[in-house]
Image (spheres, rainbow, N blue to C red):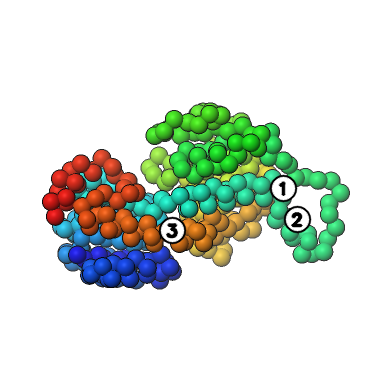
Amino acid sequence: MQIVVVAPPIAEYAINPVEDEMRRLGHEVIRYKDVAAFMAKTDALAEADILFGNGYPCTAELIGRGPKLRAIVTPWIGTEGFDMAAATARGILVANGQVPENYLSMAEATIMLILASLHNFPEKIAAMKANQPAPVRAKARMMRGKTIGMIGFGNMARAITSRLENWGVTLQTYAPRIRKPLPDGVTRVELDDLLKTSDIVCILSTLNDETRGMLSLEKLRLMKQDAILINTARGYVAPETAIEAIAKEGRLHKIALDVFETEPLPADSPLRDLPNMILTPHCVGHSREGAEAVPKTAIANIVSALSGEPPLYTLNVDAIPAWRTQWTKS
C-alpha cells in the first residue's frame, strides 16, 4: 500500500523510524519534506492509502484529493488545522499520538512551571549568575493552600490532578465538555469564576473555534492581582496582545508560556522583554521517553489502519462503524 509522508526535516526523529518500518513491511513510501511542494502537487494523494506527518493544512479540499485514503495519522497530539468533519464525511479516520509519555511529561512540566513561578526561579538563577547576595526578604510562595484553576480537563489535567493529590491545594476546572466524571476533589466552575478565584491559572485546552482568543484582556483582568498564568497548551487561547497588555499593567506575579502564536517565537517579539515572564520554546515537556514512544505509536496506528482495524488513538470515533464496514473487507 502507499503511505504519503509530509513532514519538515526538524521532525525526522519521529518520522524516519516510521518511514523505515513501512518500507520494511513492503509498503511504498513517498516523502515530502517541503510542505509547499506537497500542497502544490494536486495528485500527491491520488494513490495514497495513508497520509502521515505534520505541518500541513489538512483541509477538506486536501482530503478530497485522496480517493483511496483510509486514515490520516499524525505523530503528535495537536490536530489544529485538521478538518475532522470532512474526514468523517469521507469515512477517513484521523489518529494522533496521544501517548501517555507525552501528556504525563507535559503534566510534570506544567507543575514545574508552577513551582518555578511561585519560587521566582528566574530571578534566583540570575542573581546567582551575577554573584548577587540572596534577598533579605523572601518573595517566594508555597504551593500549599493555593487554588489551581485548569482550563480544559483532558489527559494532561487529569495527570496534574493525580500528581497534586497530596499537595494541599484546591483544584477547579472550566471544561464545557467532559467525557469522564471528574475525580474527587476537582470542582467544575464557570470561566469567570475560575479566573477570579484561582491563584494559578493553567491553560490546558485544545485549540478550536470556542477556545481561540478565549482569554481576552478583559478576561485576564478578572484574575487576582498576584496570580500566575501558565500556558502549556496552545498560544492562541490567550492572545499575545492581551498577555503583553496584562504584563505591562503589572497585574500578575508570573506568566509562564511554552506556546506561542508564531513558533519559533520571533526574535523581536515583545513577549521577550516583558517583566515577570518565563518563556520556553514549545519543548518544556519533551522527554526522551516521549520521543521514543511517538514513532512506535505512529507505526502501530498505521499498521492497524492498513489491516482494517481502527488505530488506537482515533479521534473521530463516530466514523469507526462505517469505516469498519468499508475497510475490514479489504
Quarter of the image that includes the C terminus: bottom left
Please give the name of the residue rendered at 47% of the width and 53% of the height, measured from the top-left corner.
Answer: 102
The residue identified by callout 3 is: 293
Circles 3 and 1: CB atoms closer than 8 Å: no
Quarter of the image with the N terminus is bottom left
Q: What residue would you read off at disc 2?
A: 124
Q: Identify the element where label 3 is drawn.
A: helix
The image position of residue 108, as x and y in percent, is 57, 49
Q: Earlier in the sequence, mark 2 or mark 3?
A: 2
Question: Who's the residue at 16% across and 50% down the image?
Answer: 328
* Residue 30 higher or lower than 293, as above or below: below
Tell me the number on the disc at residue 327.
Answer: none
Q: CA distance from mark 2 to mark 1?
A: 9 Å
The answer to whether residue 202 is left or right of residue 2 is right
Q: Is residue 245 visible?
A: no
Amino acid tagged 3: Ala
Q: Indicate the position of residue 271 as horizontal and vertical percent values.
A: 59, 56
Residue 308: x, y in percent?
A: 21, 52
* Separation of residues labelled 2 and 3 (CA atoms): 35 Å
Q: Earlier in the sequence, mark 2 or mark 1?
A: 1
Which mark lies nearer to you, 3 or 1?
3
